[in-house]
Amino acid sequence: MMLFNEKNPLMGFRFLVEVGGILTSGFSEVSGLQADTEVETIREGGTNDFAYKLPKATTFPNLVLKKGMVSPASEQLWGWYRNVIAGNVVRMPIFILIQSEDESISPTSIWCAWDAFPVKWVGPTLSGKSQEVAIETLEFAHHGIERV
């Protein structure tokens, strides 16, 4: 599958976002690829040299995408967020395709955020004298991440 070509406006971005099988946007920064597992410490009576550590709940921070551009061919991201605003939360996986610096055809790695939905949209500061990106920040809540 060819993701990049000279006619693709997303070609200059390192991190591409695929939703519902459609390459929807590209971003310069991604954060939130993280999982935190809470640990419960249990001490056994009479044993002072160690404690048992048992895993509890794992949480995932929101996935935050910054300095991006939405593909002109897709209004899917904004429509998805409009539905969330209206109370119709549709969860779906989103894929982050990491592009190598030489912009080769295939991504170097792919991450998936499961059961994701958009929770924050920040547009650029509009000015006739600047060439700001189309999306400053896009944030997703999700149920977990996985490298695929």
Image: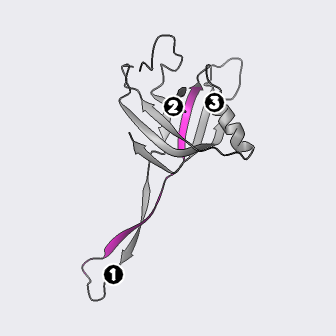
Quarter-of-image position of residue 72: top right
Q: Which of marks 1 and 3 is in front?
A: 3
In the image, residue 86 sits, relative to residue 12, either above or below, namely below
Mark sitting earlier along the chain (2/1)? 2
Mark 1 vs 3, N-terminal side = 1
Q: Residue 9: give its label.
A: none
Which residue is denoted by mark 1 in the rendering?
43
User: Magenta segment: does it hold 63?
Assistant: yes
Q: Which mark is residue 76?
A: 3
Mark 2 → mark 1, Cα distance in angstroms:
45 Å
Residue 17 badge? 2
Label 2 crowd (10 A; few <14 / some 14-19 / many >=20): many
Residue 134 appears left or right of 87: left
Q: In the rendered structure, which amino acid carries the disc numbered 3?
A: Gln
Amino acid type of disc 1? Arg
* Residue drawn where x is 69% and y is 43% of the image: 84
Which residue is depicted at the point 68% across and 33% down? 79
Is residue 98 in view? yes
- Circle 2: element type: strand
| Residue 9 % position (x, y) | 54, 17
Residue lying at the far right of the rendered structure: 86
User: Residue visible at 51% across and 31% down?
Assistant: 17
Disc 1/disc 3 C-alpha distance (Å): 52 Å
> Residue type at mark 2?
Val
Determine whether, in the image, residue 104 is placed left or right of residue 79: left
The answer to whether residue 26 is seen in the rendering is: no
Residue 52, horizontal then vertical, whole percent:
31, 75
**Residue at x 61% of width, y 32% of height:** 136
User: How would you classify the magenta stretch by its main secondary structure?
Assistant: strand
Dots 2 and 1: beta carbons under 8 Å? no
